[in-house]
Image (cartoon, rainbow, N blue to C red):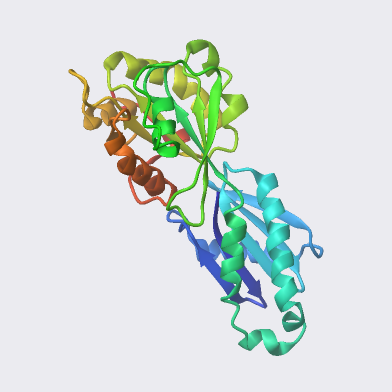
Amino acid sequence: MIREIHIFKEGQTLFKDIIVENKDIDTDSVMTLVASSAQNLQEWKIDSTEINRYRFVYMNSHNAQFIVTMDRQSSLQKVNEAMMSLVSRFMMVFESTLESDEWKSTDFTPFGIGFRKIVGTIPVKMCLAGHGGTGKTTLLELATLPSRGPAQEYVPTFFGDKALLKADFDPYIFSIFDLGGQDRFVQEWGKIIRSGSLVFIVTDSTEANLEWTKRIAYPVLKAELPYARAIAIANKQDLPGALSPQEVAGKLGVPAYGMQANQLDFRERWLELIRALAFEELEFKIVGEIKETE
């Protein structure tokens, strides 16, 4: 998931676009450091560095430094391809400008449209992780197939399902992975969830299910997606005896949000949770930092 782009020349900012702000690091200081590294690269060579949960991918062309900030967990190959595409597009318009002093007075803002189009070609990978029968497939269908309505009976997912989600998430689109929740499939999650940026830990809001989640799901998620963002979905809130979202959050050590995935009326809430986690507009936890509190 690409978060920001910065373009510098001779220490001056030519262009920047911040889609999701890096809130827990000093971005200005990091950009100064990374831009200095980029200046030493050969023309069109791509390199990267990792700081906390972020990866900074950078390139030098025509003595201009291009820096893309992405989630550390995301696919480096796809972002490298995006970097080549965006620098090529930039040079098609501004190459002659950079070769003269004209760049000092040029408005590079129009490049933002092209940048966001490129961002939109790389689906953000999100994972629905949880035990069988907790509602993962129903959540996938609730988001992507509203005309059919959510499933009303449980059909086990074999290994995993995938669907593409396009909604009001500009410039992002999402690739949703519904992970098979049967015990025999959990150890295979690592083959599916690599490069995931977002994790929704789906529960049925029962004590037994929360214990399973901590014992079986957490070790795999922490090993494979330590830098991903996560929230818990306290599903099946309409059932008798369901633990409240607050109780689920307390036991899992992850902010939890109530859902009734088998009700079409909850689709807007579900889409808003997806959007809010992607844009970091709600409370979440980094997977590697999860500590169960009870």
Quadrant into which the C terminus falls = top left
Total numbered labels placed on residues in the image: 0
Is 122 placed left or right of 134 in the picture?
Answer: right
Q: Percent position (x, y) of residue 246?
A: 23, 32
| Residue 125 showing in the rendered view | yes
Is 261 placed left or right of 107 in the picture?
Answer: left
Q: Residue furthest top?
A: 184
Quarter of the image where one finds residue 205? top left
- Look at 44% across and 32% down and name the residue there: 140
Q: Residue furthest left?
A: 240
From this view, report whether residue 223 is shown above or below residue 61. above
- Look at 40% across and 32% down and name the residue there: 148
Q: Percent position (x, y) of residue 278?
A: 44, 48
Q: Residue furthest front?
A: 147
From this view, report whether residue 27 is shown above or below residue 274. below
From this view, report whether residue 283 is shown above or below residue 182. below
| Residue 39 showing in the rendered view | no
Front residue of 285/234: it is: 234
From this view, report whether residue 6 is shown above or below residue 284. below
Q: Percent position (x, y) of residue 228?
A: 49, 39
Front residue of 270/210: it is: 270
- Look at 35% across and 46% down and name the residue there: 272
- Look at 52% across and 48% down and name the residue there: 173
Front residue of 65/1: it is: 1
Q: Percent position (x, y) of residue 58?
A: 68, 59
